[in-house]
Amino acid sequence: MAFLKIFLFAYLFCKCFCYALEARVTTESQHELQHLHTIQLSSLLPSSVCKPSTKANESDSSLKVVHRHGPCFKPNGEKGKWPSHTEILLQDQSRVNSIHSKLSAKTSARLDKMKEKGAATLPAIHGSVVGSGNYIVTVGIGTPKRKLSLIFDTGSDLTWTQCKPCVGFCYQQKEKIFDPKRSKSYRNVSCSSTVCSSLESATGNIPGCASNKTCVYGIQYGDSSFSVGFFAKETLTLTSKDVFPKFLLGCGQNNRGLFRGAAGLLGLGRNKISLVYQTASKYKKRFSYCLPSSSSSTGHLTFGPGIKKSVKFTPLSSAFQGSSFYGLDMTGISVGGEKLPIATTVFSTPGTIIDSGTVITRLSPHAYTVLKTAFRQLMSKYPTAPAVSILDTCYDFSEHETITIPKISFFFNGGVEVDVDVTGIMFPIRASQVCLAFAGNSDPSDVGIFGNVQQHTLEVVYDVAHGQVGFAAGGCS
Ligand SMILES: *[C@@H]1O[C@H](CO)[C@@H](O)[C@H](O)[C@H]1NC(C)=O
Ligand SMILES: *[C@@H]1O[C@H](CO)[C@@H](O)[C@H](O)[C@H]1NC(C)=O
Ligand SMILES: *[C@@H]1O[C@H](CO)[C@@H](O)[C@H](O)[C@H]1NC(C)=O
Protein backbone atom coordinates (compact mmCIF):
# COMPACT_ATOMS: atom_id res chain seq x y z
CA MET A 1 0.00 0.00 0.00
CA ALA A 2 2.82 2.36 1.01
CA PHE A 3 4.59 1.41 -2.17
CA LEU A 4 1.55 2.27 -4.25
CA LYS A 5 1.25 5.65 -2.50
CA ILE A 6 4.86 6.49 -3.26
CA PHE A 7 4.42 5.38 -6.82
CA LEU A 8 1.28 7.45 -7.23
CA PHE A 9 2.95 10.45 -5.65
CA ALA A 10 5.97 10.10 -7.89
CA TYR A 11 3.72 9.69 -10.88
CA LEU A 12 1.66 12.78 -10.07
CA PHE A 13 4.72 14.79 -9.17
CA CYS A 14 6.34 13.94 -12.42
CA LYS A 15 3.14 14.54 -14.34
CA CYS A 16 3.17 18.14 -13.15
CA PHE A 17 6.84 18.85 -12.83
CA CYS A 18 8.11 17.00 -15.89
CA TYR A 19 5.38 18.55 -18.00
CA ALA A 20 6.39 22.00 -16.81
CA LEU A 21 10.02 21.18 -17.46
CA GLU A 22 9.22 19.91 -20.94
CA ALA A 23 7.21 23.03 -21.69
CA ARG A 24 10.05 25.21 -20.49
CA VAL A 25 12.55 23.38 -22.67
CA THR A 26 10.25 23.80 -25.68
CA THR A 27 9.82 27.53 -25.20
CA GLU A 28 13.55 27.91 -24.67
CA SER A 29 14.41 26.18 -27.91
CA GLN A 30 11.79 28.19 -29.74
CA HIS A 31 13.32 31.28 -28.23
CA GLU A 32 16.74 30.12 -29.43
CA LEU A 33 15.48 29.46 -32.93
CA GLN A 34 14.00 32.91 -33.10
CA HIS A 35 16.95 34.77 -31.71
CA LEU A 36 20.01 32.87 -32.87
CA HIS A 37 21.62 32.15 -36.24
CA THR A 38 23.06 28.66 -36.58
CA ILE A 39 25.28 28.47 -39.65
CA GLN A 40 28.17 26.62 -41.22
CA LEU A 41 31.40 28.48 -40.54
CA SER A 42 32.34 28.03 -44.21
CA SER A 43 29.35 30.16 -45.25
CA LEU A 44 30.97 33.19 -43.60
CA LEU A 45 34.27 32.83 -45.46
CA PRO A 46 34.29 34.25 -49.01
CA SER A 47 34.96 31.97 -51.94
CA SER A 48 37.70 32.62 -54.49
CA VAL A 49 35.29 32.11 -57.39
CA CYS A 50 32.44 34.41 -58.34
CA LYS A 51 29.02 32.92 -57.59
CA PRO A 52 26.44 35.40 -58.91
CA SER A 53 23.36 35.85 -56.75
CA THR A 54 20.46 33.71 -57.88
CA LYS A 55 17.92 35.49 -55.72
CA ALA A 56 18.36 38.90 -57.31
CA ASN A 57 15.22 39.49 -59.33
CA GLU A 58 16.51 42.34 -61.40
CA SER A 59 14.03 44.66 -63.05
CA ASP A 60 14.58 46.37 -66.40
CA SER A 61 16.38 49.25 -64.74
CA SER A 62 18.84 47.15 -62.72
CA LEU A 63 22.61 47.15 -62.86
CA LYS A 64 24.68 44.30 -61.46
CA VAL A 65 26.61 45.24 -58.31
CA VAL A 66 29.99 43.61 -57.61
CA HIS A 67 32.48 44.04 -54.79
CA ARG A 68 35.69 45.76 -55.85
CA HIS A 69 37.90 43.41 -53.84
CA GLY A 70 36.38 40.08 -54.87
CA PRO A 71 36.46 37.54 -57.71
CA CYS A 72 33.41 39.09 -59.47
CA PHE A 73 35.49 42.18 -60.41
CA LYS A 74 38.69 41.52 -62.33
CA PRO A 75 40.75 44.54 -63.26
CA ASN A 76 43.23 43.75 -66.06
CA GLY A 77 46.53 42.33 -64.90
CA GLU A 78 45.72 43.04 -61.26
CA LYS A 79 43.80 39.93 -60.37
CA GLY A 80 44.00 38.89 -56.75
CA LYS A 81 45.79 42.09 -55.69
CA TRP A 82 43.23 42.96 -53.07
CA PRO A 83 44.05 45.03 -50.02
CA SER A 84 44.43 43.15 -46.73
CA HIS A 85 41.69 43.24 -44.10
CA THR A 86 43.80 45.61 -42.03
CA GLU A 87 44.18 47.96 -45.01
CA ILE A 88 40.43 47.86 -45.68
CA LEU A 89 39.68 48.67 -42.03
CA LEU A 90 42.26 51.47 -42.03
CA GLN A 91 40.76 53.00 -45.20
CA ASP A 92 37.33 52.62 -43.63
CA GLN A 93 38.48 54.63 -40.64
CA SER A 94 39.75 57.44 -42.93
CA ARG A 95 36.37 57.58 -44.61
CA VAL A 96 34.64 57.70 -41.22
CA ASN A 97 37.02 60.43 -39.98
CA SER A 98 36.26 62.54 -43.04
CA ILE A 99 32.49 62.03 -42.60
CA HIS A 100 32.82 63.06 -38.96
CA SER A 101 34.75 66.22 -39.73
CA LYS A 102 32.38 67.09 -42.55
CA LEU A 103 29.29 66.74 -40.38
CA SER A 104 30.69 67.97 -37.11
CA ALA A 105 29.28 71.16 -35.65
CA LYS A 106 32.75 72.07 -34.46
CA THR A 107 34.07 71.94 -38.02
CA SER A 108 31.22 74.10 -39.31
CA ALA A 109 31.96 76.70 -36.64
CA ARG A 110 35.66 76.63 -37.53
CA LEU A 111 34.86 77.08 -41.22
CA ASP A 112 32.55 80.00 -40.50
CA LYS A 113 35.35 81.66 -38.54
CA MET A 114 37.77 81.14 -41.42
CA LYS A 115 35.26 82.67 -43.84
CA GLU A 116 34.92 85.70 -41.56
CA LYS A 117 38.65 86.11 -41.63
CA GLY A 118 38.50 85.95 -45.42
CA ALA A 119 40.53 82.78 -45.78
CA ALA A 120 40.78 82.05 -49.48
CA THR A 121 41.42 78.32 -49.38
CA LEU A 122 39.04 75.84 -47.88
CA PRO A 123 40.58 73.00 -45.90
CA ALA A 124 40.32 69.50 -47.35
CA ILE A 125 37.84 68.49 -44.66
CA HIS A 126 35.22 70.59 -46.44
CA GLY A 127 35.58 68.36 -49.49
CA SER A 128 33.87 65.05 -50.06
CA VAL A 129 34.46 61.87 -48.14
CA VAL A 130 37.06 59.34 -49.09
CA GLY A 131 36.46 57.69 -52.45
CA SER A 132 37.33 54.18 -51.43
CA GLY A 133 33.78 52.76 -51.56
CA ASN A 134 33.57 49.10 -52.28
CA TYR A 135 30.75 48.44 -54.69
CA ILE A 136 30.91 48.73 -58.47
CA VAL A 137 28.40 48.98 -61.30
CA THR A 138 29.12 49.15 -65.03
CA VAL A 139 27.54 51.97 -67.04
CA GLY A 140 27.86 53.27 -70.60
CA ILE A 141 29.36 56.71 -71.29
CA GLY A 142 29.50 58.56 -74.63
CA THR A 143 28.37 57.90 -78.23
CA PRO A 144 29.10 55.21 -79.20
CA LYS A 145 28.86 54.14 -75.58
CA ARG A 146 31.91 52.88 -73.74
CA LYS A 147 31.40 50.53 -70.81
CA LEU A 148 33.02 51.77 -67.63
CA SER A 149 33.05 50.39 -64.06
CA LEU A 150 32.26 53.06 -61.48
CA ILE A 151 32.18 52.91 -57.68
CA PHE A 152 28.69 53.92 -56.58
CA ASP A 153 28.52 56.06 -53.50
CA THR A 154 25.56 57.45 -51.56
CA GLY A 155 28.00 59.78 -49.76
CA SER A 156 29.17 61.60 -52.95
CA ASP A 157 27.37 63.73 -55.52
CA LEU A 158 29.59 64.33 -58.54
CA THR A 159 29.86 61.53 -61.11
CA TRP A 160 33.25 61.46 -62.82
CA THR A 161 35.46 59.19 -64.90
CA GLN A 162 39.12 59.37 -65.86
CA CYS A 163 39.52 61.01 -69.26
CA LYS A 164 42.13 61.15 -72.00
CA PRO A 165 44.53 62.80 -72.54
CA CYS A 166 45.08 62.54 -68.73
CA VAL A 167 46.81 65.96 -68.68
CA GLY A 168 47.92 65.34 -65.08
CA PHE A 169 47.71 61.65 -64.22
CA CYS A 170 45.43 58.64 -64.58
CA TYR A 171 45.74 55.54 -62.38
CA GLN A 172 45.25 52.01 -63.71
CA GLN A 173 41.67 51.02 -64.39
CA LYS A 174 39.95 47.88 -65.66
CA GLU A 175 38.63 49.27 -68.97
CA LYS A 176 40.33 51.59 -71.48
CA ILE A 177 40.31 55.20 -70.35
CA PHE A 178 37.44 57.23 -71.81
CA ASP A 179 38.44 59.46 -74.74
CA PRO A 180 36.04 62.40 -75.26
CA LYS A 181 37.49 63.01 -78.74
CA ARG A 182 35.98 59.69 -79.84
CA SER A 183 32.51 60.50 -78.57
CA LYS A 184 30.01 62.41 -80.72
CA SER A 185 27.95 63.52 -77.72
CA TYR A 186 30.69 65.00 -75.46
CA ARG A 187 30.45 68.76 -74.77
CA ASN A 188 32.51 70.86 -72.40
CA VAL A 189 30.49 72.99 -69.97
CA SER A 190 31.24 76.72 -70.20
CA CYS A 191 32.63 78.35 -67.09
CA SER A 192 30.11 81.17 -67.34
CA SER A 193 27.15 78.77 -67.05
CA THR A 194 25.10 78.42 -63.86
CA VAL A 195 25.71 74.64 -63.71
CA CYS A 196 29.41 75.42 -63.47
CA SER A 197 28.86 77.60 -60.42
CA SER A 198 26.63 74.91 -58.87
CA LEU A 199 29.75 72.75 -58.55
CA GLU A 200 30.84 74.61 -55.46
CA SER A 201 28.14 73.17 -53.22
CA ALA A 202 28.68 69.64 -54.59
CA THR A 203 32.48 69.56 -54.38
CA GLY A 204 33.33 72.17 -51.75
CA ASN A 205 35.63 73.87 -54.25
CA ILE A 206 35.14 76.96 -56.41
CA PRO A 207 35.27 75.77 -60.04
CA GLY A 208 38.05 76.98 -62.31
CA CYS A 209 38.10 78.11 -65.91
CA ALA A 210 40.41 76.59 -68.55
CA SER A 211 41.40 78.65 -71.62
CA ASN A 212 38.82 81.22 -70.47
CA LYS A 213 35.95 78.93 -71.49
CA THR A 214 35.86 75.43 -70.05
CA CYS A 215 34.50 74.81 -66.55
CA VAL A 216 37.05 72.96 -64.38
CA TYR A 217 35.94 70.90 -61.37
CA GLY A 218 38.13 69.75 -58.53
CA ILE A 219 37.11 67.32 -55.86
CA GLN A 220 39.28 66.04 -53.07
CA TYR A 221 38.31 63.24 -50.75
CA GLY A 222 39.03 62.85 -47.04
CA ASP A 223 42.35 61.08 -47.58
CA SER A 224 44.65 62.47 -50.27
CA SER A 225 42.51 61.14 -53.14
CA PHE A 226 41.28 63.64 -55.71
CA SER A 227 40.01 64.15 -59.26
CA VAL A 228 40.41 67.36 -61.27
CA GLY A 229 39.22 67.86 -64.82
CA PHE A 230 36.72 69.35 -67.25
CA PHE A 231 33.07 69.54 -66.33
CA ALA A 232 31.10 68.14 -69.26
CA LYS A 233 27.74 67.12 -70.67
CA GLU A 234 27.76 63.60 -72.01
CA THR A 235 25.34 60.76 -72.73
CA LEU A 236 25.00 58.33 -69.82
CA THR A 237 23.53 54.91 -70.60
CA LEU A 238 22.38 52.97 -67.55
CA THR A 239 20.40 50.26 -69.36
CA SER A 240 19.43 49.86 -73.01
CA LYS A 241 16.15 51.65 -72.30
CA ASP A 242 17.50 54.25 -69.90
CA VAL A 243 19.71 56.70 -71.77
CA PHE A 244 20.35 60.21 -70.41
CA PRO A 245 21.72 62.75 -72.90
CA LYS A 246 23.55 65.82 -71.55
CA PHE A 247 24.25 64.21 -68.19
CA LEU A 248 26.64 66.41 -66.18
CA LEU A 249 29.83 64.60 -65.25
CA GLY A 250 33.50 65.15 -64.59
CA CYS A 251 36.09 64.27 -67.26
CA GLY A 252 39.02 63.66 -64.93
CA GLN A 253 42.43 64.85 -66.18
CA ASN A 254 44.32 64.40 -62.93
CA ASN A 255 43.19 61.58 -60.67
CA ARG A 256 44.85 59.95 -57.72
CA GLY A 257 43.89 57.82 -54.80
CA LEU A 258 42.19 54.65 -53.74
CA PHE A 259 39.91 54.23 -56.77
CA ARG A 260 42.28 51.75 -58.44
CA GLY A 261 40.57 49.43 -60.89
CA ALA A 262 37.40 51.51 -61.10
CA ALA A 263 37.07 54.17 -63.83
CA GLY A 264 35.59 56.72 -61.43
CA LEU A 265 32.62 57.41 -59.22
CA LEU A 266 28.83 57.37 -59.58
CA GLY A 267 27.41 59.96 -57.17
CA LEU A 268 24.11 59.03 -55.49
CA GLY A 269 24.11 61.71 -52.78
CA ARG A 270 21.52 64.40 -52.02
CA ASN A 271 23.02 67.36 -53.90
CA LYS A 272 21.33 68.60 -57.10
CA ILE A 273 24.26 67.44 -59.17
CA SER A 274 23.93 63.78 -58.15
CA LEU A 275 22.50 61.13 -60.45
CA VAL A 276 19.36 61.00 -58.29
CA TYR A 277 18.42 64.58 -59.21
CA GLN A 278 19.71 64.53 -62.79
CA THR A 279 17.52 61.51 -63.62
CA ALA A 280 14.55 62.64 -61.50
CA SER A 281 12.10 63.05 -64.41
CA LYS A 282 12.46 59.37 -65.27
CA TYR A 283 13.15 57.67 -61.92
CA LYS A 284 11.25 60.03 -59.56
CA LYS A 285 14.29 60.27 -57.26
CA ARG A 286 13.95 56.65 -56.31
CA PHE A 287 16.61 53.93 -56.35
CA SER A 288 17.36 50.79 -54.40
CA TYR A 289 20.24 48.40 -54.06
CA CYS A 290 21.14 45.08 -52.59
CA LEU A 291 24.70 44.48 -51.48
CA PRO A 292 25.60 40.78 -51.62
CA SER A 293 26.42 38.64 -48.57
CA SER A 294 30.07 38.27 -49.61
CA SER A 295 32.59 39.66 -52.07
CA SER A 296 32.16 36.48 -54.13
CA SER A 297 28.48 37.10 -54.84
CA THR A 298 26.63 39.83 -56.74
CA GLY A 299 23.80 42.26 -55.98
CA HIS A 300 21.93 44.95 -57.87
CA LEU A 301 21.38 48.69 -58.14
CA THR A 302 17.89 49.46 -59.43
CA PHE A 303 16.44 52.80 -60.50
CA GLY A 304 12.84 53.96 -60.47
CA PRO A 305 9.64 53.37 -58.55
CA GLY A 306 9.10 49.58 -58.93
CA ILE A 307 8.91 48.62 -55.24
CA LYS A 308 8.10 45.39 -53.44
CA LYS A 309 5.22 45.53 -50.95
CA SER A 310 7.21 44.18 -48.02
CA VAL A 311 9.44 47.27 -47.75
CA LYS A 312 9.22 49.07 -44.38
CA PHE A 313 9.97 52.80 -44.58
CA THR A 314 11.48 55.19 -42.06
CA PRO A 315 11.50 58.97 -42.67
CA LEU A 316 14.76 60.63 -43.71
CA SER A 317 16.04 62.68 -40.79
CA SER A 318 16.01 66.43 -41.15
CA ALA A 319 19.37 66.59 -39.39
CA PHE A 320 21.70 66.29 -42.37
CA GLN A 321 19.60 67.92 -45.07
CA GLY A 322 22.25 70.31 -46.32
CA SER A 323 24.84 67.54 -46.78
CA SER A 324 25.22 64.72 -49.31
CA PHE A 325 24.26 62.15 -46.68
CA TYR A 326 21.04 60.28 -45.99
CA GLY A 327 20.18 60.71 -42.30
CA LEU A 328 17.99 58.22 -40.44
CA ASP A 329 16.61 58.28 -36.90
CA MET A 330 17.94 55.15 -35.23
CA THR A 331 16.16 54.44 -31.95
CA GLY A 332 17.53 51.16 -30.64
CA ILE A 333 19.35 47.86 -31.10
CA SER A 334 18.49 44.32 -30.02
CA VAL A 335 20.89 41.44 -29.49
CA GLY A 336 19.62 37.85 -29.23
CA GLY A 337 16.04 39.12 -29.09
CA GLU A 338 16.63 41.48 -26.16
CA LYS A 339 16.36 45.22 -26.72
CA LEU A 340 19.50 46.82 -25.28
CA PRO A 341 19.02 49.29 -22.40
CA ILE A 342 20.27 52.38 -24.28
CA ALA A 343 18.52 55.75 -23.97
CA THR A 344 17.24 56.97 -27.36
CA THR A 345 19.13 60.24 -26.85
CA VAL A 346 22.38 58.26 -27.20
CA PHE A 347 21.32 57.77 -30.83
CA SER A 348 19.41 60.99 -31.45
CA THR A 349 22.03 63.43 -30.11
CA PRO A 350 24.70 62.69 -32.76
CA GLY A 351 22.21 61.27 -35.32
CA THR A 352 22.78 58.42 -37.78
CA ILE A 353 23.43 58.25 -41.53
CA ILE A 354 23.21 55.30 -43.90
CA ASP A 355 26.22 55.03 -46.21
CA SER A 356 27.03 52.62 -49.05
CA GLY A 357 30.74 53.38 -48.76
CA THR A 358 31.45 52.87 -45.05
CA VAL A 359 32.22 49.22 -44.33
CA ILE A 360 31.73 48.76 -40.55
CA THR A 361 28.74 50.25 -38.69
CA ARG A 362 29.79 52.95 -36.21
CA LEU A 363 27.84 53.50 -32.99
CA SER A 364 28.23 56.07 -30.27
CA PRO A 365 30.77 54.86 -27.67
CA HIS A 366 28.13 54.02 -25.05
CA ALA A 367 25.83 52.14 -27.46
CA TYR A 368 28.78 50.11 -28.72
CA THR A 369 29.90 49.18 -25.20
CA VAL A 370 26.41 47.93 -24.30
CA LEU A 371 26.13 46.00 -27.59
CA LYS A 372 29.57 44.43 -27.19
CA THR A 373 28.89 43.41 -23.58
CA ALA A 374 25.58 41.70 -24.44
CA PHE A 375 27.13 40.00 -27.45
CA ARG A 376 30.13 38.73 -25.50
CA GLN A 377 27.86 37.22 -22.84
CA LEU A 378 25.95 35.25 -25.46
CA MET A 379 29.19 34.15 -27.15
CA SER A 380 31.02 33.09 -23.97
CA LYS A 381 31.28 29.43 -25.06
CA TYR A 382 33.69 30.32 -27.88
CA PRO A 383 37.40 31.02 -27.37
CA THR A 384 38.29 34.65 -28.04
CA ALA A 385 40.85 35.82 -30.60
CA PRO A 386 43.03 38.96 -30.79
CA ALA A 387 41.49 42.27 -31.88
CA VAL A 388 42.05 43.49 -35.46
CA SER A 389 42.35 47.22 -36.12
CA ILE A 390 39.02 48.80 -35.05
CA LEU A 391 37.37 45.42 -34.29
CA ASP A 392 37.81 44.42 -30.65
CA THR A 393 35.44 41.46 -30.19
CA CYS A 394 36.89 38.47 -32.07
CA TYR A 395 36.50 34.69 -31.81
CA ASP A 396 38.45 31.62 -32.80
CA PHE A 397 36.02 29.30 -34.61
CA SER A 398 38.70 27.02 -36.07
CA GLU A 399 37.49 24.04 -33.96
CA HIS A 400 33.87 24.46 -35.10
CA GLU A 401 32.05 23.51 -38.27
CA THR A 402 28.78 24.98 -37.14
CA ILE A 403 28.49 28.17 -35.12
CA THR A 404 25.64 29.87 -33.31
CA ILE A 405 25.47 33.66 -33.26
CA PRO A 406 22.87 35.92 -31.60
CA LYS A 407 20.67 37.85 -34.01
CA ILE A 408 21.07 41.63 -34.11
CA SER A 409 18.35 44.08 -35.16
CA PHE A 410 18.26 47.85 -35.61
CA PHE A 411 15.21 49.96 -34.81
CA PHE A 412 14.33 53.17 -36.64
CA ASN A 413 11.77 55.93 -36.30
CA GLY A 414 8.31 54.69 -37.30
CA GLY A 415 8.68 51.34 -35.53
CA VAL A 416 10.85 49.93 -38.32
CA GLU A 417 12.88 46.89 -37.26
CA VAL A 418 15.70 45.76 -39.54
CA ASP A 419 17.24 42.34 -38.97
CA VAL A 420 20.93 42.32 -39.80
CA ASP A 421 21.95 39.37 -42.00
CA VAL A 422 24.29 36.87 -40.32
CA THR A 423 27.07 37.97 -42.73
CA GLY A 424 26.51 41.51 -41.41
CA ILE A 425 27.19 40.52 -37.81
CA MET A 426 30.58 38.86 -38.14
CA PHE A 427 33.57 40.10 -40.15
CA PRO A 428 35.77 37.09 -41.02
CA ILE A 429 39.51 37.63 -41.13
CA ARG A 430 40.15 33.87 -41.06
CA ALA A 431 38.46 30.88 -39.33
CA SER A 432 40.53 31.50 -36.21
CA GLN A 433 39.71 35.22 -36.11
CA VAL A 434 36.11 36.21 -36.82
CA CYS A 435 35.12 39.57 -35.33
CA LEU A 436 31.95 41.38 -34.38
CA ALA A 437 31.51 43.78 -37.34
CA PHE A 438 30.72 46.89 -35.31
CA ALA A 439 32.85 49.67 -33.86
CA GLY A 440 32.38 52.54 -31.45
CA ASN A 441 33.02 56.19 -32.32
CA SER A 442 35.60 57.89 -30.12
CA ASP A 443 33.36 60.88 -29.38
CA PRO A 444 29.66 60.66 -28.34
CA SER A 445 28.92 63.67 -30.58
CA ASP A 446 30.17 61.92 -33.75
CA VAL A 447 27.45 60.74 -36.13
CA GLY A 448 26.56 57.03 -36.15
CA ILE A 449 26.90 55.25 -39.51
CA PHE A 450 24.84 52.31 -40.82
CA GLY A 451 27.63 50.69 -42.80
CA ASN A 452 27.60 48.43 -45.84
CA VAL A 453 28.46 45.15 -44.08
CA GLN A 454 25.27 45.47 -42.02
CA GLN A 455 23.30 46.17 -45.22
CA HIS A 456 24.22 42.78 -46.76
CA THR A 457 21.29 41.09 -48.57
CA LEU A 458 18.82 43.86 -47.62
CA GLU A 459 16.87 45.64 -50.33
CA VAL A 460 17.59 49.25 -49.33
CA VAL A 461 15.15 51.65 -51.00
CA TYR A 462 15.95 55.38 -51.21
CA ASP A 463 12.72 57.25 -51.90
CA VAL A 464 14.11 60.78 -51.93
CA ALA A 465 10.97 62.36 -53.38
CA HIS A 466 8.94 61.20 -50.39
CA GLY A 467 11.76 61.71 -47.88
CA GLN A 468 12.07 58.11 -46.75
CA VAL A 469 14.38 55.10 -46.80
CA GLY A 470 12.99 51.56 -46.70
CA PHE A 471 14.24 48.06 -45.97
CA ALA A 472 13.15 44.58 -47.01
CA ALA A 473 14.85 41.26 -46.31
CA GLY A 474 16.13 38.97 -49.06
CA GLY A 475 17.02 41.49 -51.78
CA CYS A 476 19.87 39.24 -52.97
CA SER A 477 22.04 36.43 -51.60
C1 LIG B 1 11.25 37.68 -61.17
O1 LIG B 1 9.91 37.89 -60.79
C2 LIG B 1 8.96 37.69 -61.81
C3 LIG B 1 7.56 37.99 -61.29
O2 LIG B 1 7.57 38.71 -60.11
C4 LIG B 1 9.04 36.24 -62.32
O3 LIG B 1 8.14 36.06 -63.39
C5 LIG B 1 10.48 35.97 -62.78
O4 LIG B 1 10.59 34.61 -63.15
C6 LIG B 1 11.48 36.29 -61.68
N1 LIG B 1 12.82 36.13 -62.19
C7 LIG B 1 13.80 35.53 -61.52
C8 LIG B 1 15.13 35.48 -62.18
O5 LIG B 1 13.64 35.05 -60.41
C1 LIG C 1 40.37 85.79 -70.50
O1 LIG C 1 39.34 86.70 -70.17
C2 LIG C 1 39.79 87.90 -69.59
C3 LIG C 1 38.58 88.71 -69.17
O2 LIG C 1 37.53 88.58 -70.10
C4 LIG C 1 40.70 88.65 -70.60
O3 LIG C 1 41.17 89.83 -70.01
C5 LIG C 1 41.86 87.72 -70.94
O4 LIG C 1 42.64 88.33 -71.97
C6 LIG C 1 41.36 86.37 -71.48
N1 LIG C 1 42.48 85.48 -71.67
C7 LIG C 1 42.57 84.65 -72.70
C8 LIG C 1 43.79 83.77 -72.72
O5 LIG C 1 41.75 84.60 -73.59
C1 LIG D 1 37.29 70.83 -73.62
O1 LIG D 1 38.03 71.88 -73.03
C2 LIG D 1 39.42 71.66 -72.94
C3 LIG D 1 40.03 72.87 -72.22
O2 LIG D 1 39.60 74.05 -72.77
C4 LIG D 1 39.99 71.46 -74.32
O3 LIG D 1 41.38 71.18 -74.23
C5 LIG D 1 39.28 70.32 -75.00
O4 LIG D 1 39.74 70.16 -76.31
C6 LIG D 1 37.79 70.56 -75.01
N1 LIG D 1 37.13 69.39 -75.57
C7 LIG D 1 36.18 69.48 -76.49
C8 LIG D 1 35.67 68.18 -77.03
O5 LIG D 1 35.70 70.54 -76.84
Image (spheres, rainbow, N blue to C red):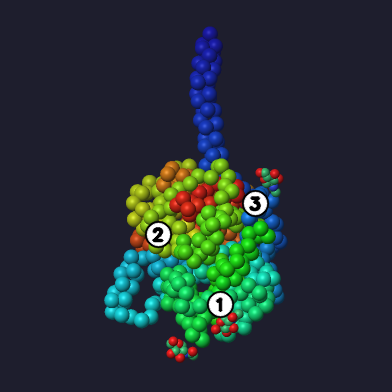
Label 3 vs 1, first from the N-terminus: 3
Q: Give, as a three-letter code, the residue at label 3.
A: Ser
Q: Earlier in the sequence, mark 2 or mark 1?
A: 1
Q: Distance between the residues labelled 2 and 1?
A: 30 Å
Where does the image place residue 353, in percent across and percent down from the top left? Answer: 44, 58
> Which class describes the residues within 10 Å of circle 2: few (<14), some (14-19), or many (20+)?
few
Asked which secondary structure carries label 2, the reply is: loop
Q: Residue 68, located in which quarter of the rendered image?
A: bottom right
Q: Which of 473 and 60 is in front in this view?
A: 60
Q: Mark 3 or mark 2, which has the lower sequence index?
A: 3
- Front residue (pair 104, 288): 288
Question: Which residue in the protein does label 2 denote?
Answer: 321
Which one is nearer the viewer's eye here, 332 or 259?
Answer: 259
What residue sits 56% from the left and 55% below the top? 283
Tell whether label 2 touches label 3 (CB within 8 Å): no
**Residue 257, position in %: x, y?**
54, 76
Q: In this view, does 303 lie above or below 13?
A: below
- Which residue is tagged 1? 188
- Say whether mark 1 is within 8 Å of ligand 3: yes
Identify the residue at horizontal 53%, vertical 52% (top origin). Answer: 461
What is the CA distance from the residue labelled 3 to the residue labelled 1? 33 Å
Q: Is residue 187 rendered to the left or right of residue 50?
A: left
Q: Which of marks 3 and 1 is in front?
A: 1
Residue in the foreground of this view, choosing between 342 and 297:
297
The residue drawn where x is 39% and y is 59% is: 320
Q: Name the residue under label 3.
A: 59
Is residue 51 rendered to the left or right of residue 168?
Answer: right
Circle 2: residue type: Gln
